[in-house]
Image (spheres, rainbow, N blue to C red):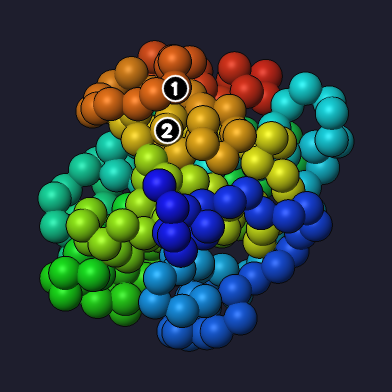
Amino acid sequence: MSGPASARRAAPAGGGGARPAAVVLRTVTASWYQDGPEGPLVRLPHTGSARCRAVPGCGQPRAVLFGRDGTLVEEVPHNTDPGRIRPLPSAREALEALRTAGVHAGVVSNQPGIGCGALRLEQLDALHARMEALLGPVAVTAVCPHRPQDDCACRKPEPGLVFAACRVLGVRPSETAVVGGRTADLGAAHRAGATGVLVRSGRLGRSGAPPRTAAHLGAAVRALVGTPAGH
């Protein structure tokens, strides 16, 4: 593939802590950023996040990025109601284990309802605010708002969401793991140069990456950071 889309798929440069320039929504709990309509949406909580204590090269990731639907919370197609957000088993324990280990936790999620006009950004923020109220805070959320036919660089399995989250957190993709229930999550990890872990309870699809699997979310986190999380 050639042209602007393939150019945007290039890996990010080193360095860290860089948020997108433009604020597109500010709420009571968080701010959303986006560098132009072709880029991902990035949500940063106003509370900030704890400093990552994982040492580079120590053998464990410095950040773990999760898919949202079917990984952290129950999948509810076309959901716009925060009251229908329900955590999956061991999700809260898994995130708490990462906080205890000093590892950043984030979310990477395809949300084409934004591009289709079926989901407003204010509604999306309310969904994520409810999820964090139930599971505890995450350091960053990166969302692809585009439709599948838009040929963007951020819709998983493209790596743009992983790159965006890593830029904000100040970590390299090679220091990052992506945990999800779809092989598109693994594809995004593989293309970004991150470690991918497939939670086997999720919905599978095609991916060029050979799967590293875990029976459930707690097992995935234990394998990554060696911290008990769930059963």
In this view, 145 is above or below 55: below
Residue type at numbered disc 2? Gly
> In this rendering, would 68 be left or right of 77?
right
Residue 82 picture location, percent across and down:
25, 63
Q: Residue shown at 16%/69% (left/top)?
A: 116
Closer to the camera, 66 or 152? 152
Residue 112 picture location, percent across and down:
24, 60
Residue 149 picture location, percent across and down:
21, 57
Closer to the camera, 215 or 15? 15
State if disc 2 and disc 1 touch (CB < 8 Å).
yes
Give neighbour class at mark 1: few <14, some 14-19, many 20+ (Cα, 10 Å): some
> In this rendering, would 77 be left or right of 178?
left
Q: Residue shown at 62%/49% (left/top)?
A: 11
Closer to the camera, 207 or 121? 207
In this figure, which residue is indicated by the disc labeled 2?
187
SS for callout 2: helix
Q: Can residue 120 be seen by looking at this rendering? A: yes
Q: CA distance from mark 1 to mark 2?
A: 6 Å
- The image quadrant that residue 170 belongs to is bottom right
SS for callout 1: loop
Residue type at numbered disc 1? Ala
Closer to the camera, 158 or 97? 158
> In this rendering, would 8 be left or right of 193?
left
Q: Can residue 135 be seen by looking at this rendering? A: no
- Which disc is residue 209 wearing? 1
Q: Residue furthest front?
A: 2
